[in-house]
Protein backbone atom coordinates (compact mmCIF):
# COMPACT_ATOMS: atom_id res chain seq x y z
CA UNK A 1 0.00 0.00 0.00
CA UNK A 2 2.81 2.42 0.87
CA UNK A 3 4.47 1.92 -2.50
CA UNK A 4 1.15 2.34 -4.28
CA UNK A 5 0.53 5.67 -2.54
CA UNK A 6 4.08 6.76 -3.32
CA UNK A 7 3.59 5.98 -6.99
CA UNK A 8 0.40 8.03 -7.05
CA UNK A 9 2.17 10.95 -5.39
CA UNK A 10 4.94 10.89 -7.97
CA UNK A 11 2.48 10.57 -10.84
CA UNK A 12 0.39 13.50 -9.65
CA UNK A 13 3.52 15.61 -9.21
CA UNK A 14 4.62 14.84 -12.77
CA UNK A 15 1.20 15.51 -14.23
CA UNK A 16 0.49 12.08 -15.73
CA UNK A 17 -0.55 8.67 -14.50
CA UNK A 18 -1.17 5.31 -16.17
CA UNK A 19 -2.61 2.37 -14.30
CA UNK A 20 -0.60 -0.87 -14.59
CA UNK A 21 -1.84 -3.13 -17.34
CA UNK A 22 -3.30 -0.33 -19.45
CA UNK A 23 -1.95 0.19 -22.92
CA UNK A 24 0.62 2.97 -23.25
CA UNK A 25 1.80 2.92 -26.85
CA UNK A 26 4.16 5.87 -27.27
CA UNK A 27 5.07 5.52 -30.91
CA UNK A 28 1.93 6.41 -32.82
CA UNK A 29 2.38 8.70 -35.79
CA UNK A 30 2.04 9.23 -39.47
CA UNK A 31 4.64 6.60 -40.31
CA UNK A 32 3.46 4.09 -37.72
CA UNK A 33 1.25 2.02 -39.99
CA UNK A 34 0.09 -1.12 -38.24
CA UNK A 35 2.00 -0.08 -35.13
CA UNK A 36 -0.43 2.76 -34.47
CA UNK A 37 -2.71 0.05 -33.07
CA UNK A 38 -2.02 -0.79 -29.47
CA UNK A 39 -0.60 -4.31 -29.33
CA UNK A 40 1.01 -4.05 -25.91
CA UNK A 41 0.01 -7.03 -23.76
CA UNK A 42 1.50 -6.11 -20.35
CA UNK A 43 2.85 -2.60 -20.12
CA UNK A 44 5.77 -2.39 -17.70
CA UNK A 45 6.43 1.37 -17.84
CA UNK A 46 4.06 4.01 -16.46
CA UNK A 47 6.07 7.18 -15.79
CA UNK A 48 8.42 7.68 -18.76
CA UNK A 49 7.06 9.85 -21.57
CA UNK A 50 9.34 8.50 -24.29
CA UNK A 51 9.76 4.84 -23.31
CA UNK A 52 7.20 2.06 -23.47
CA UNK A 53 8.12 -1.49 -22.48
CA UNK A 54 5.59 -4.31 -22.75
CA UNK A 55 5.89 -8.04 -22.23
CA UNK A 56 4.10 -9.72 -25.13
CA UNK A 57 4.65 -13.26 -23.88
CA UNK A 58 6.49 -16.13 -25.54
CA UNK A 59 9.85 -14.65 -24.59
CA UNK A 60 9.30 -11.36 -26.44
CA UNK A 61 9.36 -7.85 -24.99
CA UNK A 62 8.36 -4.90 -27.13
CA UNK A 63 10.17 -1.58 -26.65
CA UNK A 64 8.99 1.63 -28.32
CA UNK A 65 10.99 4.84 -28.01
CA UNK A 66 9.08 7.97 -28.98
CA UNK A 67 10.80 10.82 -30.78
CA UNK A 68 11.13 13.82 -28.42
CA UNK A 69 11.92 16.14 -31.34
CA UNK A 70 9.03 15.07 -33.58
CA UNK A 71 5.80 13.93 -31.96
CA UNK A 72 4.49 12.54 -35.27
CA UNK A 73 7.02 9.71 -35.40
CA UNK A 74 8.78 7.05 -33.36
CA UNK A 75 12.53 7.20 -32.87
CA UNK A 76 13.06 3.44 -32.58
CA UNK A 77 11.22 0.15 -32.08
CA UNK A 78 12.72 -3.05 -30.77
CA UNK A 79 11.69 -6.64 -30.12
CA UNK A 80 13.74 -8.11 -27.28
CA UNK A 81 13.56 -11.83 -27.89
CA UNK A 82 14.92 -14.42 -25.47
CA UNK A 83 17.74 -16.45 -26.98
CA UNK A 84 15.80 -19.67 -26.54
CA UNK A 85 12.62 -18.27 -28.17
CA UNK A 86 11.52 -18.02 -31.77
CA UNK A 87 11.45 -14.54 -33.31
CA UNK A 88 7.75 -13.69 -33.85
CA UNK A 89 6.50 -13.13 -37.37
CA UNK A 90 5.07 -9.86 -38.63
CA UNK A 91 7.13 -7.55 -36.44
CA UNK A 92 7.42 -4.92 -39.15
CA UNK A 93 10.42 -3.72 -41.13
CA UNK A 94 11.18 -0.93 -38.65
CA UNK A 95 11.40 -3.23 -35.61
CA UNK A 96 14.95 -4.19 -34.69
CA UNK A 97 15.40 -7.58 -33.01
CA UNK A 98 17.75 -7.88 -30.03
CA UNK A 99 18.45 -11.27 -28.51
CA UNK A 100 18.41 -11.19 -24.71
CA UNK A 101 20.06 -11.29 -22.35
CA UNK A 102 22.67 -9.24 -24.18
CA UNK A 103 26.16 -10.62 -23.55
CA UNK A 104 28.34 -7.88 -25.11
CA UNK A 105 27.45 -4.18 -25.12
CA UNK A 106 29.14 -0.92 -26.04
CA UNK A 107 27.97 1.91 -23.78
CA UNK A 108 28.53 5.55 -24.62
CA UNK A 109 27.55 7.15 -21.30
CA UNK A 110 28.76 6.70 -17.72
CA UNK A 111 25.11 7.10 -16.70
CA UNK A 112 24.25 3.79 -18.31
CA UNK A 113 27.40 1.93 -17.25
CA UNK A 114 26.53 2.99 -13.71
CA UNK A 115 23.06 1.50 -14.10
CA UNK A 116 24.48 -1.73 -15.49
CA UNK A 117 26.97 -1.89 -12.63
CA UNK A 118 24.17 -1.57 -10.07
CA UNK A 119 22.27 -4.36 -11.82
CA UNK A 120 25.32 -6.61 -11.58
CA UNK A 121 25.68 -6.56 -15.37
CA UNK A 122 28.88 -4.53 -15.80
CA UNK A 123 30.45 -7.69 -17.22
CA UNK A 124 28.41 -7.18 -20.40
CA UNK A 125 30.23 -3.92 -21.16
CA UNK A 126 33.05 -4.50 -23.64
CA UNK A 127 33.49 -0.95 -24.93
CA UNK A 128 32.79 2.64 -23.90
CA UNK A 129 33.09 6.05 -25.48
CA UNK A 130 34.96 8.98 -23.91
CA UNK A 131 36.70 6.65 -21.48
CA UNK A 132 39.05 9.38 -20.30
CA UNK A 133 36.13 11.25 -18.74
CA UNK A 134 35.07 8.43 -16.43
CA UNK A 135 35.80 9.30 -12.78
CA UNK A 136 38.99 7.74 -11.31
CA UNK A 137 36.99 5.66 -8.82
CA UNK A 138 34.52 4.38 -11.43
CA UNK A 139 34.42 0.64 -12.09
CA UNK A 140 34.79 1.26 -15.82
CA UNK A 141 38.04 3.20 -15.30
CA UNK A 142 39.59 0.19 -13.60
CA UNK A 143 38.34 -2.19 -16.29
CA UNK A 144 39.79 0.01 -19.05
CA UNK A 145 43.14 -0.02 -17.27
CA UNK A 146 42.98 -3.82 -17.09
CA UNK A 147 42.22 -4.03 -20.82
CA UNK A 148 38.83 -5.65 -20.25
CA UNK A 149 36.95 -2.68 -21.72
CA UNK A 150 38.10 -0.74 -24.78
CA UNK A 151 37.70 3.01 -25.30
CA UNK A 152 36.35 3.62 -28.81
CA UNK A 153 36.88 7.39 -28.75
CA UNK A 154 34.38 10.27 -28.62
CA UNK A 155 30.70 9.37 -28.45
CA UNK A 156 29.80 11.55 -31.43
CA UNK A 157 32.53 10.06 -33.65
CA UNK A 158 33.55 6.62 -32.33
CA UNK A 159 36.14 4.50 -34.09
CA UNK A 160 34.27 2.05 -36.31
CA UNK A 161 37.29 -0.27 -36.23
CA UNK A 162 37.51 -0.39 -32.44
CA UNK A 163 33.77 -0.73 -32.14
CA UNK A 164 33.74 -3.66 -34.57
CA UNK A 165 36.68 -5.29 -32.78
CA UNK A 166 34.78 -5.17 -29.48
CA UNK A 167 32.19 -7.61 -30.82
CA UNK A 168 29.38 -5.68 -29.19
CA UNK A 169 25.83 -6.81 -29.99
CA UNK A 170 24.23 -3.50 -28.99
CA UNK A 171 25.41 0.08 -28.61
CA UNK A 172 23.70 2.10 -25.89
CA UNK A 173 23.99 5.74 -26.85
CA UNK A 174 22.31 9.09 -26.27
CA UNK A 175 21.39 10.72 -29.61
CA UNK A 176 21.37 14.50 -29.71
CA UNK A 177 18.73 16.55 -31.52
CA UNK A 178 17.23 13.69 -33.51
CA UNK A 179 20.54 12.37 -34.79
CA UNK A 180 18.86 9.08 -35.71
CA UNK A 181 20.14 5.55 -35.52
CA UNK A 182 23.13 5.97 -37.81
CA UNK A 183 25.14 3.06 -39.15
CA UNK A 184 26.61 0.53 -36.75
CA UNK A 185 29.41 -1.86 -37.71
CA UNK A 186 28.42 -5.43 -38.52
CA UNK A 187 25.17 -6.53 -36.94
CA UNK A 188 25.27 -4.18 -33.98
CA UNK A 189 22.02 -2.51 -32.98
CA UNK A 190 21.95 1.05 -31.67
CA UNK A 191 19.70 1.44 -28.64
CA UNK A 192 18.60 5.07 -28.49
CA UNK A 193 18.76 6.11 -24.83
CA UNK A 194 16.99 9.46 -24.67
CA UNK A 195 16.30 9.24 -20.96
CA UNK A 196 17.90 12.67 -20.55
CA UNK A 197 14.96 14.20 -22.43
CA UNK A 198 12.37 13.00 -19.91
CA UNK A 199 10.50 15.88 -18.22
CA UNK A 200 10.35 14.24 -14.78
CA UNK A 201 13.03 12.64 -12.58
CA UNK A 202 10.96 9.49 -12.02
CA UNK A 203 10.24 9.25 -15.74
CA UNK A 204 13.97 9.26 -16.41
CA UNK A 205 14.73 6.81 -13.60
CA UNK A 206 12.24 4.36 -15.13
CA UNK A 207 14.67 3.85 -18.02
CA UNK A 208 16.58 1.56 -15.66
CA UNK A 209 13.90 -1.00 -16.54
CA UNK A 210 15.18 -1.02 -20.12
CA UNK A 211 18.66 -1.95 -18.90
CA UNK A 212 17.04 -4.67 -16.83
CA UNK A 213 15.21 -6.10 -19.85
CA UNK A 214 18.34 -6.03 -22.00
CA UNK A 215 20.46 -7.86 -19.44
CA UNK A 216 17.92 -10.28 -17.97
CA UNK A 217 17.58 -8.38 -14.70
CA UNK A 218 13.90 -7.40 -14.78
CA UNK A 219 13.13 -8.14 -11.13
CA UNK A 220 16.25 -6.42 -9.80
CA UNK A 221 15.62 -3.32 -11.91
CA UNK A 222 12.01 -3.19 -10.72
CA UNK A 223 13.05 -3.51 -7.08
CA UNK A 224 15.55 -0.67 -7.41
CA UNK A 225 13.05 1.54 -9.22
CA UNK A 226 10.32 0.89 -6.67
CA UNK A 227 12.76 1.95 -3.95
CA UNK A 228 13.50 5.16 -5.85
CA UNK A 229 9.78 5.97 -6.01
CA UNK A 230 9.35 5.35 -2.27
CA UNK A 231 12.31 7.51 -1.27
CA UNK A 232 11.52 10.30 -3.73
CA UNK A 233 7.91 10.42 -2.56
CA UNK A 234 8.96 10.60 1.08
CA UNK A 235 11.17 13.59 0.32
CA UNK A 236 8.35 15.37 -1.51
CA UNK A 237 6.18 14.94 1.59
CA UNK A 238 8.92 16.34 3.80
CA UNK A 239 9.44 19.36 1.56
CA UNK A 240 5.71 20.03 1.34
CA UNK A 241 5.52 20.19 5.14
CA UNK A 242 8.29 22.78 5.50
CA UNK A 243 7.36 25.89 7.45
CA UNK A 244 10.01 28.06 5.76
CA UNK A 245 9.20 29.94 2.54
CA UNK A 246 10.11 28.50 -0.83
CA UNK A 247 13.54 29.95 -1.68
CA UNK A 248 14.21 31.40 -5.13
CA UNK A 249 16.86 29.13 -6.66
CA UNK A 250 19.55 30.10 -9.16
CA UNK A 251 21.60 27.35 -10.82
CA UNK A 252 24.80 27.00 -12.84
CA UNK A 253 27.08 29.80 -14.10
CA UNK A 254 27.95 31.56 -17.32
CA UNK A 255 30.14 29.66 -19.79
CA UNK A 256 31.84 31.40 -22.72
CA UNK A 257 29.36 34.27 -22.52
CA UNK A 258 26.26 32.04 -22.29
CA UNK A 259 24.40 30.93 -19.17
CA UNK A 260 22.79 27.54 -19.77
CA UNK A 261 19.79 26.89 -17.56
CA UNK A 262 17.27 24.03 -17.49
CA UNK A 263 13.99 24.88 -19.21
CA UNK A 264 10.80 24.94 -17.19
CA UNK A 265 9.55 21.51 -18.34
CA UNK A 266 12.86 19.72 -17.66
CA UNK A 267 13.40 17.14 -14.96
CA UNK A 268 15.87 19.54 -13.29
CA UNK A 269 13.19 22.20 -12.95
CA UNK A 270 10.82 19.54 -11.63
CA UNK A 271 13.35 18.48 -8.97
CA UNK A 272 13.71 22.05 -7.69
CA UNK A 273 9.93 22.31 -7.40
CA UNK A 274 9.65 18.89 -5.73
CA UNK A 275 12.27 19.97 -3.19
CA UNK A 276 10.23 23.04 -2.28
CA UNK A 277 12.18 25.60 -4.30
CA UNK A 278 11.02 28.43 -6.54
CA UNK A 279 12.70 28.23 -9.96
CA UNK A 280 12.55 31.57 -11.83
CA UNK A 281 12.26 29.89 -15.25
CA UNK A 282 9.56 27.37 -14.34
CA UNK A 283 7.22 29.05 -16.83
CA UNK A 284 9.46 28.47 -19.86
CA UNK A 285 8.58 25.67 -22.33
CA UNK A 286 10.81 22.75 -23.26
CA UNK A 287 12.72 19.96 -21.57
CA UNK A 288 16.18 21.03 -22.72
CA UNK A 289 18.31 24.05 -21.87
CA UNK A 290 17.88 27.81 -22.12
CA UNK A 291 20.84 29.78 -23.46
CA UNK A 292 20.76 33.20 -21.81
CA UNK A 293 23.04 36.17 -21.23
CA UNK A 294 24.10 37.20 -17.75
CA UNK A 295 21.85 40.25 -18.07
CA UNK A 296 18.80 38.11 -18.83
CA UNK A 297 19.58 35.84 -15.90
CA UNK A 298 19.94 38.83 -13.60
CA UNK A 299 16.52 40.13 -14.60
CA UNK A 300 14.87 37.13 -12.98
CA UNK A 301 17.37 35.87 -10.42
CA UNK A 302 19.64 38.63 -9.11
CA UNK A 303 17.53 38.50 -5.93
CA UNK A 304 17.75 34.70 -5.60
CA UNK A 305 18.03 33.16 -2.14
CA UNK A 306 20.18 30.15 -3.06
CA UNK A 307 22.75 29.54 -5.80
CA UNK A 308 23.58 25.95 -6.81
CA UNK A 309 26.70 25.50 -8.94
CA UNK A 310 28.27 22.48 -10.57
CA UNK A 311 31.92 22.74 -11.55
CA UNK A 312 34.73 20.39 -12.53
CA UNK A 313 37.97 20.25 -10.56
CA UNK A 314 37.01 22.74 -7.87
CA UNK A 315 34.10 23.78 -5.68
CA UNK A 316 32.75 27.23 -6.48
CA UNK A 317 32.55 29.84 -3.74
CA UNK A 318 32.01 33.60 -3.72
CA UNK A 319 35.70 34.34 -4.28
CA UNK A 320 36.11 32.00 -7.24
CA UNK A 321 32.87 33.21 -8.81
CA UNK A 322 33.78 36.89 -8.52
CA UNK A 323 37.25 36.08 -9.88
CA UNK A 324 35.56 34.66 -12.97
CA UNK A 325 33.22 37.62 -13.38
CA UNK A 326 33.00 40.48 -10.90
CA UNK A 327 29.36 41.02 -11.85
CA UNK A 328 28.52 37.79 -10.00
CA UNK A 329 29.05 39.80 -6.82
CA UNK A 330 25.77 41.61 -7.45
CA UNK A 331 23.73 38.43 -7.09
CA UNK A 332 22.08 38.20 -3.68
CA UNK A 333 23.28 34.67 -2.75
CA UNK A 334 26.85 36.00 -2.73
CA UNK A 335 26.09 38.55 -0.01
CA UNK A 336 23.95 36.00 1.86
CA UNK A 337 26.65 33.35 1.73
CA UNK A 338 24.16 30.92 0.23
CA UNK A 339 26.31 29.43 -2.52
CA UNK A 340 26.35 25.65 -2.70
CA UNK A 341 28.92 24.03 -4.98
CA UNK A 342 29.36 20.53 -6.35
CA UNK A 343 32.72 19.44 -7.78
CA UNK A 344 31.64 16.92 -10.41
CA UNK A 345 35.17 15.53 -10.75
CA UNK A 346 34.77 13.85 -7.35
CA UNK A 347 30.99 13.79 -6.82
CA UNK A 348 29.04 11.43 -9.13
CA UNK A 349 26.03 13.72 -9.44
CA UNK A 350 25.68 13.35 -13.21
CA UNK A 351 25.63 9.56 -12.95
CA UNK A 352 23.36 9.34 -9.92
CA UNK A 353 20.75 11.86 -11.03
CA UNK A 354 19.58 9.60 -13.86
CA UNK A 355 18.52 6.48 -11.96
CA UNK A 356 18.69 7.79 -8.38
CA UNK A 357 17.20 11.29 -8.42
CA UNK A 358 16.12 10.79 -4.80
CA UNK A 359 19.75 11.08 -3.72
CA UNK A 360 20.17 14.52 -5.25
CA UNK A 361 16.67 15.54 -4.15
CA UNK A 362 17.70 14.86 -0.55
CA UNK A 363 20.48 17.46 -0.89
CA UNK A 364 18.05 19.95 -2.42
CA UNK A 365 15.50 19.53 0.36
CA UNK A 366 18.20 19.86 3.03
CA UNK A 367 19.49 23.06 1.39
CA UNK A 368 16.07 24.65 0.81
CA UNK A 369 14.40 23.51 4.04
CA UNK A 370 17.02 22.25 6.53
CA UNK A 371 14.45 22.11 9.33
CA UNK A 372 12.80 19.03 7.75
CA UNK A 373 16.13 17.18 7.36
CA UNK A 374 17.69 17.32 10.85
CA UNK A 375 21.11 15.71 11.05
CA UNK A 376 21.37 15.22 7.28
CA UNK A 377 24.85 15.61 5.78
CA UNK A 378 25.00 16.92 2.21
CA UNK A 379 26.29 14.24 -0.20
CA UNK A 380 26.95 16.26 -3.36
CA UNK A 381 26.93 19.96 -2.53
CA UNK A 382 28.85 21.91 0.08
CA UNK A 383 28.17 25.42 1.30
CA UNK A 384 30.87 27.94 0.47
CA UNK A 385 32.73 29.41 3.40
Image (cartoon, rainbow, N blue to C red):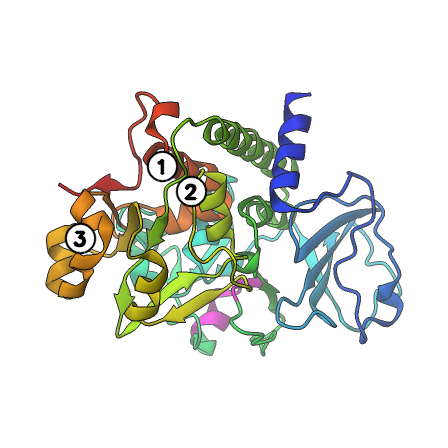
Q: Which residue is mark 3?
A: 314
Magenta-highlighted residues: 162-174
Q: Within the magenta stretch, is there residue 183? A: no
Crowd band around label 2 with a 10 angstrom C-alpha radius: few (<14), some (14–19), many (20+): many
**Residue depicted at x 56% and y 29%:** 230
Q: Earlier in the sequence, mark 2 or mark 1?
A: 2
| Label drawn at residue 277 | 2
Quadrant in which the N terminus is drawn: top right
Q: Are marks 2 and 1 in contact (CB under 8 Å)?
A: yes
Q: Which residue is mark 1?
A: 368
User: In what element is the residue under mark 2?
Assistant: loop
Q: Is residue 249 above or below residue 95?
A: above
Residue 40 location, x and y as percent? Answer: 83, 51
**Is 160 displayed left or right of 92 in the figure?**
left
Q: CA distance from mark 2 to mark 1?
A: 6 Å
Query: Which of 184/210 is in front?
Result: 210
Residue 166 is a magenta residue: yes
**What residue is rendered at 23% in x and 43% in y?**
338
Amino acid sequence: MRRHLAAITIALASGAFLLPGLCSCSGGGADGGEHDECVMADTLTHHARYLTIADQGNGTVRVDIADPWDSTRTLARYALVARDSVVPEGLGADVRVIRTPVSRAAVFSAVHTGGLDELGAIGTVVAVADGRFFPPADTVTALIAEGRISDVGPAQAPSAELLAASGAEVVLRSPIDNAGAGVMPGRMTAVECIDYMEPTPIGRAEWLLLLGELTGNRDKARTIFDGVIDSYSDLIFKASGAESARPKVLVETEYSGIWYLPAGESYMARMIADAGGDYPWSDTPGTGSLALSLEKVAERAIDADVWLTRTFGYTADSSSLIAQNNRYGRFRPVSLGNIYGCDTSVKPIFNDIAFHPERILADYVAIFHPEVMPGYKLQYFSKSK
